[in-house]
Amino acid sequence: MVGDVPRVVPSEHRKPLWLIPNLLSLDAPFVAVAWLYMFAKTWRVDYLPWAAYFSLGLVVWVIYVTDRLLDASMIGGVSGKLEARHEFHRKHRKVFRNLVIIAGLSAVILVVTRLPMTIYGFGIGGGGDINSIPFVGAIMVAGFFIMSVFSTHGPEEIPYSKNILAGICFAYGTAMIAYAFTSFETWEFLRSRELICFAVLCILNISAIDLWEHANRSTDPEIKATDELALTLPLILLGGSALVFASQDRELTTRPFFYAILTGAALLHILNRNRARFSMDALRVLADVVLLIPFLVFLASAKS
């Protein structure tokens, strides 16, 4: 109270609690850690150290925060033109920059001191040759940031190439940690159904936001229908493939994983059909929830 006048905080400065993980870029690290656990259990990794989960979470957080800081700076930092997450990173950019340095150094220390050499470049098999898996991942991440800085997309364009690369990077980096603790050959890893299905799910999840924003900006019913179909058809194909792969697994080792993929695809389809009921900020949060709920399905399926 100031005198007899109640002090009221303007509504635009109050952020709902459910939006905080998105504003802090914590949603993607949680998703990565959850799916790393599923990859490890599916591929029968006997032991995955805590450092694997922490280092993955830190690396994903650093990448996402850096990308949002870049986006905020390139847009120009004009209030009103930035999304809530980018505006939040712009306002607190000094804090985020310092935290990125600390998180990045912490991730490097964990990887070097706690994880096998396979993670950062040297194979523990294959005659001691340098393992190309981590280097490929680093190249893809570098390519993603190059596309973020130099690619130009108009307001009516959907950055499919960037979304595809981002989805592949996310899936590849997550699965790579579990792969380092298996006896798989490189080719087995790259062509595994689990990796491919998760990569497709990530691509569709990332593209969904752009498609929803594009549809919202248009008043043309044909464009809206096209955007919905661009997401619906791939989701149906992904869900169908996951169901087939699950039914083909007679040993039941990968079935829980494909049930999780099927759940993610089904929930994203439901969200796509009901997107008009939610704000864009809510849709961004729900798109991440869509990738977290399959973790519960995986746990339930694995126990049964």
Image (cartoon, rainbow, N blue to C red):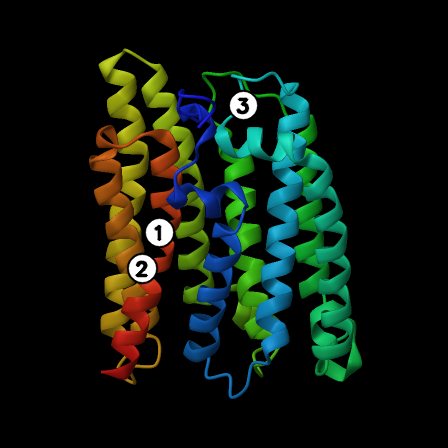
Q: Residue at x 27, y 83 (%)?
A: 303
Q: Residues within 10 Å of mark 1 (few under 14, many from 20)?
A: some
Sort mark 2 into few (<14), some (14-19) or many (20+) by Cα contacts within 10 Å: some
- Residue 133 sits in which quadrant? bottom right
Secondary structure beneath disc 1? helix
| Callouts 2 and 1 close, C-beta under 8 Å | yes
3 and 2 marks in contact (CB < 8 Å): no
Asked whether residue 203 appears in the rendered view, the answer is yes
Give the labeled residue for mark 2.
Answer: 293
Q: Which residue is mark 1?
A: 289
The percent coordinates of residue 222 (x first, y second) are 24, 16
Quickly name the residue at label 3.
82
Identified at 31% across, 37% down, the residue is: 231
Q: Secondary structure at mark 2?
A: helix
Q: Residue 279 placed where, x, y %?
A: 32, 29
* Amino acid type, label 3: Leu
Determine the CA span between mark 3 and mark 1: 23 Å
